[in-house]
Amino acid sequence: MAPLIDLHTHSTVSDGTETPEELVATAAAAGIGTLALTDHDTTGGWERAAAVLPAGMRLVRGAEFSCVSPTGRPQTPGDRATVAVHLLGYLFDPTHEAIVAEQRRLVAERVERLRTMAQNVAADYPQLDADRIFDHVPEGTTPGRPHLGQALMRAGVVGSVDEAFAHILRNGSPYYVPKTDTPVERAVQMIVDAGGVPVFAHPLARRRGRVIELSVLADLAALGLAGVEVDHPDHSPEDRALLRGFAKDIGLVPTGSSDFHGTNKSTPIAAETTAPEAFEELVAKASGVPVL
Ligand code: AMP
Ligand code: FE
Ligand code: FE
Ligand code: ZN
């Protein structure tokens, strides 16, 4: 079997459950030949993954940027509806000042936001000790709702992180606290300026709530967006077909990725993969750091 290409995975440096070292080993065992590490809002796992890279596996250093996007083109002059979205950035210079500053700002805000969400939840679920929410979050990790989901599991409130999301942590829940995400147009520009390659992550993950109109992808393509995740566990077969056709029409590279989070999600690594030609097209646009 040809080595697989999985361009979207998370480690314990954000909300995955495997360390970067374990993730690389899991990827190798699954037949992955090209792995992208894309933790939320951090490049903190890059060196650890690179240090244990086995011969024959290529590492694409990346990150998943927390962004906010218009839902579509404004229909009326005052129309400013927005939605939280994720943007993958690959092979960008990790010392680029704007990226460093924005990641530092977002991680700091995520710490306070998770503390507040934990306090909100603990008011109704006193089994949760909100003061100890960070006990199991390693230093330097980007905290996220799955960490609160884990704490709710340990407290016996839910049986799984999925269940925690369904009942307590979902977007729009009374406990939810928003964060100040980066405008997606600005994030595309930052990644391009840093020599990286921006790819829109899971644009039609409808189970998480409202999604963007496809016109947003066309507008971002004009700013330098290079690709779009087509094959993703949260995309229906109909949406994949729609996205594949749209990507082709507007010249975006289609990717496929597992968005592996270890046991925080049920999807195994390499559940979705990217075609070699698509991957090479993305790499050809990069000038920040090389594929290892
Ligand atoms: P946050 O970045 O803190 O807003 O949390 C978002 C993260 O939670 C995503 O990156 C996913 O890893 C995870 N997530 C979102 N929706 C769900 C869900 N329905 N079930 C399990 N995990 C989810
Ligand atoms: Fe995540
Ligand atoms: Fe995501
Ligand atoms: Zn992800």
Image: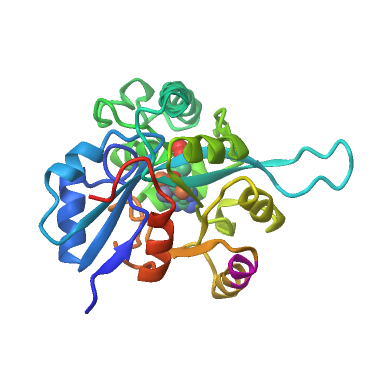
Q: Position of residue 203 (x, y in %)?
A: 57, 56
Residue segment shown in magenta:
245-249
Image quadrant in which you'd find residue 51: top left
Q: Residue at x 35, y 37 (%)?
A: 147
Please count the marks in the image: 0
Magenta segment includes 136 = no
Q: Residue at x 28, y 51 (%)?
A: 291
Q: Is residue 22 left or right of residue 165?
A: left
Q: Is residue 48 left or right of residue 88?
A: left
Q: Position of residue 251 (x, y in %)?
A: 59, 63
Furthest residue to the right? Answer: 76
In what quadrant of the picture does the N terminus appear?
Answer: bottom left
Position of residue 282 relative to residue 223, above or below, is below
Asked whether the viewer can see residue 164, the reply is: no
Front residue of 214 and 138 = 214
Position of residue 68 relative to residue 224, above or below, is above
Front residue of 125 and 4 = 4
Q: Position of residue 7 (x, y in %)?
A: 36, 57
Asked whether the viewer can see residue 217, the reply is: yes
Q: Main secondary structure of the magenta part?
A: helix
Position of residue 273 relative to residue 41, above or below, is below
Ligand 2 occupies quarter? top left
